[in-house]
Amino acid sequence: MSDSDEWESDSDDAPVVTVPRETVGTVVVPTYSKPDREAMPTTLELLNVIKTKNTLCLYRCEPANKEYPGVRIPSSFARDEAIMVSIELHNAIGTPVRTRIPNFKSKGLSSIRRENVVFVMRPKTDTIYFKKKCQDNITKMDTAFELGGGFSSHTGEITPQFTIVMAPFVKGKVVTERAVRTSKFHVFSKRQDRHTASTKKRHKKNTEILKMDTNIREATITLEALKQELVRLQYRTKISENTNSRIRQMTEGLQDGPIKIGLEYGTRTQQSNNFISV
């Protein structure tokens, strides 16, 4: 049998292997180093936070009054398949630290939560609002913003700073080159004096405190006067003791008699059991 009698393919083309495209449920979730975040444009607008001096603060335990914290989605992301949203500990030392994205306050968002990020599927609105403070009824874990104090060990005890990052998901990839972030912000429980703007208004002191301040001031003046009087009396006492000592020495040369007895008695050394040292 000749070789031509064997089965042969009429085509020289190799079989085509189709690689399935990644989805938001399977794509590798990227992380951002601090240099990555520093290089990102800060064009992601942060909504409903408090600006004190040059610092943005979110006070989690204060009433929202229907003004919930959120972000405004850039118009450049409007036609993308999905958007990956994350909250990064911006001033973490060493390994990047990511905190859980809060549950949404906005209604009608189609999203998939993975690890600590959320993929929002082509939102119909340009704003996303988050719950400010909320706990899961079963696990009792925070499902809104986490307090910055719990992350101090990652920042070398420096006040933790956070930033929200958005990156588009296009054709099976998270396009980190187009990622944007918000300005840095803090998350506190309530307002603290060292993070609020200073005021020129004088605070009224409690009446009892004013009274105590006056008593302390008067007692201090009296004590200083008594110290000066003590120094003066100690000086006069020393002079008297020296004078008596010289008289006793001179008395030794007198003849025995009433005068000598009187001088010795008058210049005798006196001791008191009631001596008080100040």
Image (spheres, rainbow, N blue to C red):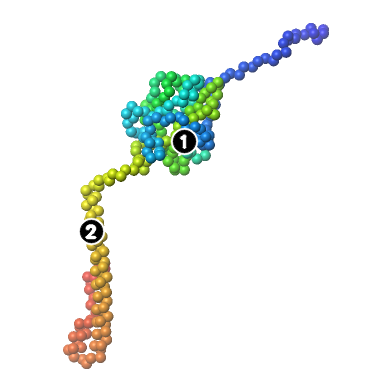
Of residue 207 and residue 143, the one placed in the foreground of this image is: 207
Q: Residue at x 25, y 57 (%)?
A: 217
Q: Is residue 263 left or right of residue 141?
A: left
Rendered location of residue 111, percent (x, y): 45, 22
**Do tag 2 and tag 1 residues touch (Cβ < 8 Å)?**
no
In the rendered structure, which amino acid carries the disc numbered 2? Answer: Glu
Q: Could you tell me which quadrant the N terminus lies in? A: top right
Q: Residue at x 45, y 29 (%)?
A: 44
- The answer to whether residue 113 shows anywhere in this view is no
First along the sequence among labels 2 and 1: 1
Residue 79 sits above or below residue 192 on the image: above
What number is the disc on residue 89? 1
Q: Could you tell me which quadrant the C terminus lies in? A: bottom left
Q: Residue at x 50, y 27 (%)?
A: 167
Give the SS element for disc 2. helix
Dot 1: within a 10 Å radius of its alpha carbon, few (fewer than 14), some, or many (20 or more) residues? Answer: many
Give the SS element for disc 1. strand
Residue denoted by label 2: 218
